[in-house]
Image (tube, helix red, strand yellow):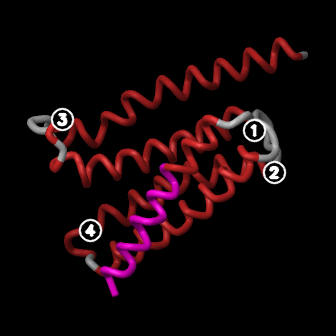
Amino acid sequence: MFSGILIIHIAAGFICLVTGLGAMLSQKRRGKHSWFGEVYHGSFVVIFLSSITMAIMHWEESAYLFYIGFFSYSFAIIGYLTVKKKWKNWLRYHISGMLGSYIAVITAVLVVNAPKIAFFQGIPILWIWFLPTIIGSPLIALTNVKYRSKKASAT
């Protein structure tokens, strides 16, 4: 049963990587961006539920993944709901939430796969855990500034 859930988890993670990139690269309006975003969020729900389930099944060695699952999904749900509910400053929260959740997906992929990739050999695992956040957080800030500037110049 665990292996089946893991396969579903990996497939959903791959879908998140692809659709997240698609949403980032597509024009920001209804259509492709929205479609990629909906599929991304749906796949992230699968990642969240499967990670929680697997953490509970192997609690002794994976309890921390239970909490990481909730923390990671919180970014995705904030990014998703802020658009649906049109919160005040929704665009900033949408960008931060969705890109923050994408950082979580990249982190998971790197933590699992980096030890098998020659480029990452010799890099301490703690660096692998934090590298996506160290690189991604300034990019989120720059993206927020970019879209805030566009919004200001449009009004």
Local packing at callout 1 (Cα closer than 10 Å; few below 14, some 14-19, many 20+) is some
For marks 4 and 2 on the same chain, the one whose residue lies earlier in the sequence: 4
User: Which quadrant holds residue 67?
Assistant: bottom left
Q: Rounded to the nearest whole Å, what is the CA distance between mark 1 and mark 3? A: 38 Å
Identify the residue under disc 1: 90
Viewer-closest of 124 and 24: 24
Q: CA distance from mark 2 to mark 1?
A: 8 Å
Residue 119: give its label.
3
Nearest to the observer: residue 98 or residue 34: 34
Q: Residues within 10 Å of mark 4 (few under 14, many from 20)?
A: some
Quarter of the image with the C terminus in it: top right
Q: Residues within 10 Å of mark 3 (few under 14, many from 20)?
A: few
Q: Which residues are magenta?
A: 1-17
- Secondary structure of the residue carrying tag 4 is helix
Residue 62's disc number: 4
Q: Main secondary structure of the magenta part?
A: helix
Chain-order first, disc 1 or disc 4? 4
Q: Amino acid at mark 2?
A: Lys
The amino acid marked with disc number 3 is Phe
Kind of residue sitting beneath label 1: Trp
Is mark 2 in CB contact (under 8 Å) with mark 1? yes
